[in-house]
Image (cartoon, rainbow, N blue to C red):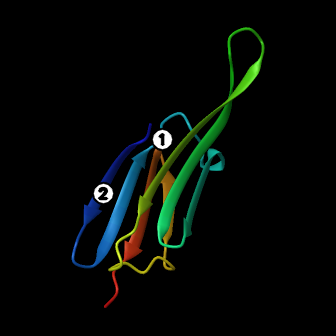
Amino acid sequence: MLNVDVNETDDELQIVAELHSLTANDIDVSVERGVLTIIAERQVNDGRGAERTIRVLSSMLLPSSVDAHKINAYFDDGVMTVTFPKHR
């Protein structure tokens, strides 16, 4: 489960997800039909020499007040921040 915070101002909607121990290459962010989806996936050793995949997914319906086509996403120090401007 992802720890996700949603912050909204008059100008934008910001979603912040804590994804510690992951890299930017482990994360996929997409918007389709007004739904933001964050998928985090990585391979880990199970301690017996075998690899397994850990996958975490979070989706949220975006409010109609935001421009979903103008997504701005960045990942820094284990935190993914996704920002959408609001329609004017």
Which of the 4 quarters of the picture holds residue 65?
A: bottom left
Left or right, 53 with respect to 68, comes to right
Quarter of the figure with the N terminus: top left
Residue 10 image position (x, y, % from top left): 21, 78
Q: Residues within 10 Å of mark 1 (few under 14, many from 20)?
A: many
Quarter of the figure with the C terminus: bottom left
The residue at the point 57 percent across, 49 percent down is 39
Which residue is nearer to you in this view: 75 or 33?
A: 33
The label number, if any, that marks residue 5 in the structure image: none
Return the residue at label 1.
Answer: 19
The residue at the point 37 percent across, 78 percent down is 66
Residue 83 image position (x, y, % from top left): 40, 68
Return the residue at label 2.
Answer: 6
Q: Residues within 10 Å of mark 2 (few under 14, many from 20)?
A: few
Which of the 4 quarters of the picture holds residue 63?
A: bottom left
Which residue is nearer to you in this view: 6 or 62?
A: 62
The residue at the point 41 percent across, 64 percent down is 61
Left or right, 6 with respect to 54, comes to left
Task: Kindly report the distance in space between the C-alpha atoms of the residues bearing marks 2 and 1.
Answer: 15 Å
**Badge 2 or badge 1: first in the primary sequence:** 2
Left or right, 79 with respect to 54, comes to left
Pointers 2 and 1 in contact (CB under 8 A)?
no
